[in-house]
Image (cartoon, grey):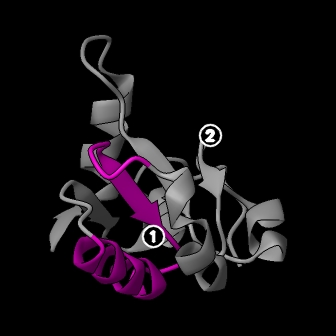
Amino acid sequence: MRQITATELAERLAAPQGDQPLLLDVREPGEFAICRIEGSLLMPMATVPARQTELDPDDEIVVICHHGGRSAQVCMFLERQGFSKVINLAGGVAAWATQVDPTMPQY
């Protein structure tokens, strides 16, 4: 499974050229309400199997959770379903808050 650090993702999102990855947040709605990376799509982990048809298997997808555990599980699931470009955000939004955006609320 591929991984990306919060800093690498921030650099990637700030780059003017190229296609941007889909940011797939697999946390629960209450967590998403507290903090999120701008532009991310909420799809709680438990709903991914039923909603995977909403995703394009050819798109690059960065999967996000609180610390990186749930997102890693979703990455492995999506890879088994034929998604070839899934990337886990190492450290999740917690890493984003400490490494990229210190103003982001943490929980």
Mark 2 is surrounded, within 10 Å at the Cα level, by few (under 14), some (14 to 19) or many (20 or more) other residues, namely few
Q: What kind of residue is marked 2?
A: Glu
Residue at the image point whose x is 24% and y is 17% from the top? 18
Indicate the position of residue 39 as horizontal and vertical percent values: 61, 38
Residue 90 in the image: x percent, y percent? 31, 71
Q: Is residue 73 magenta?
A: yes
Q: Residues within 10 Å of mark 1 (few under 14, many from 20)?
A: many
Q: Residue 68, located in which quarter of the rendered image? A: bottom left
Q: In this view, does 41 lie above or below 47?
A: above
Residue 38 - label = 2
Q: What stretch is highlighted in magenta?
A: 56-81
User: Circle 1 — which element?
Assistant: helix
Residue 19 falls within the magenta-colored stretch: no
> Percent position (x, y) of residue 91?
38, 74
For marks 1 and 2, give the CA distance.
14 Å
Residue positioned most to the top: 16
In the depicted structure, whether residue 106 falls above or below residue 72: above
Query: Which residue occupies the foreground of this view, 1 or 9?
Result: 1
Image quadrant where one finds the C terminus: bottom right
Residue at (36% x, 39% y) in the render = 21
- Mark 2: which secondary structure? loop
Left or right: residue 105 versus residue 71 is right
Q: Which of the marked residues, 1 or 2, is nearer the chain's N terminus?
A: 2
Residue toward you, 94 or 65:
65
Q: Is 54 situated above or below 80? A: above
- Please give the name of the residue rendered at 61% of the width and 75% of the height, measured from the top-left corner: 50
Q: Mark 1 points at which residue?
A: 92
Look at label 1 and name its amino acid: Gly
Q: Which residue is drawn at 32% across and 11% down?
A: 16
